[in-house]
């Protein structure tokens, strides 16, 4: 990867990490106010920024070529494939909410729906997984959608870990350094 392009990707990851942290602050503030709408707005913003980091690090489509092309970026930011930013399932649920509603309508026998709940997953009883949309447990940081679990706290922690590395790497020159002759 060309150094100038690498620096641009590092700057983008830095910015998106900052966005995750801003959204995390908004999440905490909205929870303190018990504002359900603001809470899920903050969660959606956090997921979107986390997905943007994921796309930068692994490419839009996780083909072998995209993975190889972005390897220098992941290496420079000390990010491995086991990073909690790698999966995009939860972001996809939120981004394709219209498709999820259509599928719920087709597949749910009762058309029950539990959505935008601020309670532990176990507190919702009598619903099939497809009938459980957005649920967040403030005590654990667990976000659930259709039985998929995702922990917000590990995403925030990973963004906090990457941010100083991305800040340092993005500040480096964008041209190849020539070593002076001895």
Image: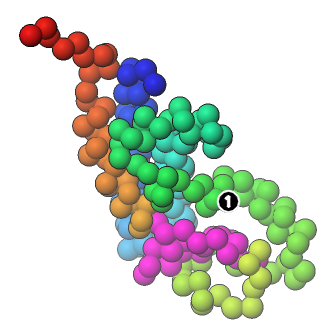
41 left or right of 75 in image: right
Height in image: 180 above or below 108?
Answer: above
Tell which of 81 and 160 is nearer to you. Answer: 81
Q: How was this image coloured? A: rainbow
Percent position of residue 48, x then y: 54, 50
Q: Is residue 19 magenta?
A: no
Tell which of 132 and 73 is nearer to you. Answer: 73
Quadrant assignment, res 33: bottom left
Height in image: 144 above or below 19?
Answer: below
Q: Which residue is mark 1?
A: 93
Looking at the image, which residue is at 41% across and 67% down?
153
Question: What kind of element bears circle 1?
Answer: helix
Percent position of residue 140, x then y: 44, 79
Looking at the image, which residue is at 57% across and 56% down?
87
Outermost residue to the left: 182
Q: Is residue 179 visible?
A: yes
Tell which of 121 and 161 is nearer to you. Answer: 161
124 left or right of 165 in image: right
101 left or right of 116 in image: right
Height in image: 85 above or below 122?
Answer: above
Looking at the image, which residue is at 77% across and 62% down?
100
Percent position of residue 133, x then y: 68, 71
Q: Is residue 52 visible?
A: no
Quadrant assignment, res 21: bottom left
Question: How many numbered marks have been drawn onto this rendered protein structure?
Answer: 1
Percent position of residue 90, x then y: 61, 61
Q: Which residues are magenta?
A: 131-152
Which quadrant does the C terminus fall into?
Answer: top left
Is disc 1 surrounded by few (<14), some (14 to 19) or many (20+) residues within 10 Å?
Answer: some
Looking at the image, which residue is at 43% across and 20% down?
2
Height in image: 36 above or below 85?
Answer: below
């Amino acid at each position: 990867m060309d150094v100038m392009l690498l620096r641009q990707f590092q700057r983008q990851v830095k910015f998106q990490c900052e966005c995750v942290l801003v959204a995390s602050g908004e999440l905490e503030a909205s929870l303190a106010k018990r504002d359900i709408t603001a809470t899920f707005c903050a969660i959606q913003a956090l997921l979107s920024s986390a997905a943007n980091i994921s796309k930068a690090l692994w490419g839009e489509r996780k083909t072998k070529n995209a993975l190889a092309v972005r390897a220098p970026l992941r290496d420079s930011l000390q990010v491995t494939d086991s990073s909690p930013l790698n999966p995009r399932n939860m972001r996809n649920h939120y981004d394709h909410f219209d498709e999820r509603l259509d599928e719920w309508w087709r597949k749910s026998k009762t058309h029950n729906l539990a959505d935008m709940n601020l309670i532990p997953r176990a507190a919702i009883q009598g619903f099939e997984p497809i009938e459980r949309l957005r649920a967040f447990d403030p005590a654990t940081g667990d976000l659930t959608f259709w039985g998929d679990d995702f922990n917000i706290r590990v995403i925030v922690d990973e963004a906090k870990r990457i941010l100083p590395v991305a800040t340092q790497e993005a500040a480096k020159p964008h041209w190849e350094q020539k070593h002076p002759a001895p």
